[in-house]
Amino acid sequence: MPTFTHPPSLPSSLISFITHFYQTSDKPDAVDTYLSFLTPDVEFVMGLNAVRGSGAVRKIRENMWGGVATRQHVPSAVYTNADGSELMIHGTVIYGLRNGKKVENVGWAALMVFEEEGAKREEWKMRRYQDGAPLSKALAEQAAAEGQ
């Protein structure tokens, strides 16, 4: 995964967290590992789906690979609030579709909010995660471009 820009004050443990989280996110069979990055009562927003709790996130993760064979998140920049408990991540994502097509360079952003005590520990857990990857918009744009 390419290196992303970030504030110099961002702890190396958070840089590692971000890298490993998105590597895990891009593996369809890594549901349990994915859930290990979240608190059990996480507030989770993926596109238009907003749920609470790891059980509901498990269901979203299991269903989100329907038309997608591969994903590759490429973070380019990370921004943080003053105490490091919230991160905004910007980048692109590449989708490999089950129909053999590829959708590249789709703009994407995410919000990570960590447990209050997370800033004092090395083991980070997200209590809120919001991902704005617009897969449906990317697929619609691709379909429109192919129809021309």
Image (cartoon, rainbow, N blue to C red):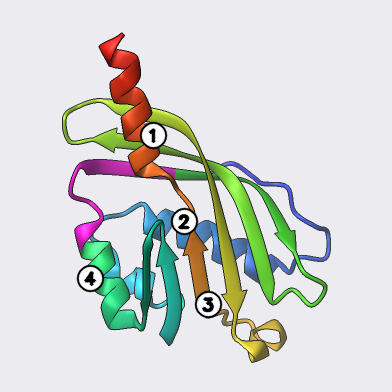
Q: Amino acid at mark 3?
A: Met
Q: Residue at x 65, y 89 (%)?
A: 116
Can you say whether 107 is above or below 32 in the image? above
Nearer the viewer's eye, disc 4 or disc 2? Answer: 4
Q: Quadrant of residue 110?
A: bottom right
Q: Can residue 22 be found in the magenta stretch?
A: no
- Name the secondary structure under disc 2: helix
Q: Which residue is mark 4?
A: 59
Q: CA distance from mark 4 to mark 3?
A: 18 Å
Horizontal arrangement in the rendering, residue 145 relative to residue 4 (left or right):
left
Q: Earlier in the sequence, mark 4 or mark 1?
A: 4
Q: Residue at x 38, y 34 (%)?
A: 138
Q: Amino acid at mark 4?
A: Lys
Q: Which residue is mark 2?
A: 22
Q: Residue at x 31, y 54 (%)?
A: 27
Q: Earlier in the sequence, mark 1 or mark 3?
A: 3
